[in-house]
Amino acid sequence: MKLALETGAQGYVPKSGSKEELLDAINAALWGKTYVPAEHGAKLNEIANIYQPLSKREKEVLHLLRQGKTNNQIADSINLRKRSVENIVSNIYLKTGAANRKELMDL
């Protein structure tokens, strides 16, 4: 679930979820919000809230950062200039409140 949220999923509904839960999740996604059922705990909601403001590209770069890739490696793998990746990483820091890569890894 965590990986799905990190890479852009708008929410999570378990197989055992009710019709109402599914409708709530769909409505949340339509409004640009992230849906995670309460029984899956505050931690997943916290994760969802951290990743919600990130763009698809920022989520992609964050996923690669968490794999230990350097800016150069990320730039090569997604066909961007290193400077573009550096800008994206800066935006990720701003949006998540992380001060460095270690803090990003701990999110």
Image: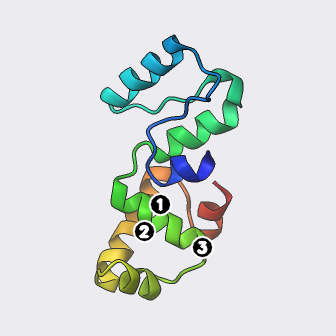
Q: Please say if the residues under marks 1 and 3 sit with CB atoms less than 8 Å apart.
A: no
Residue plotted at (64% across, 38% down): 44
- Give the spatial CA distance, label 3 vs label 2: 14 Å
Answer few, some or many: residues within 10 Å of disc 2's Cα (few below 14, many 20 plus, some between 14 and 19): some
Answer few, some or many: residues within 10 Å of disc 3's Cα (few below 14, many 20 plus, some between 14 and 19): few
Q: Which residue is mark 1?
A: 93
Residue 39: quarter of image: top right
Quarter occupied by the C terminus: bottom right
- Give the spatial CA distance, label 1 vs label 3: 17 Å
Viewer-proximal residue among 14 and 1: 14
Answer few, some or many: residues within 10 Å of disc 1's Cα (few below 14, many 20 plus, some between 14 and 19): some
Residue plotted at (52% across, 65% down): 63
Q: Is residue 87 above or below residue 4?
A: below
Residue plotted at (43% across, 80% down): 74
Q: On residue 89, which mark appears? A: 2
Direction from residue 94 to residue 82 in the image, left or right: left
Residue plotted at (37% across, 82% down): 75
Quarter occupied by the N terminus: top right
Q: What amino acid is found at the position of numbered circle 3 in the picture?
A: Gln
User: Can you give x and y, in whole percent of width and height, for residue 54 in the image?
Assistant: 40, 51
User: Can you give x and y, in whole percent of width and height, for residue 8 in the image?
Assistant: 43, 49
Q: On residue 32, which mark appears? A: none
Q: Please say if the residues under marks 3 and 2 sit with CB atoms less than 8 Å apart.
A: no
Q: Please say if the residues under marks 1 and 2 sit with CB atoms less than 8 Å apart.
A: yes
Q: What amino acid is found at the position of numbered circle 2 in the picture?
A: Val
Q: Which residue is mark 3?
A: 67
Disc 1 or 3, which lies upstream in sequence?
3
The colour scheme used to paint the residues is rainbow
Labels in figure, total: 3
Give SS at disc 3. loop
Give SS at disc 2. helix
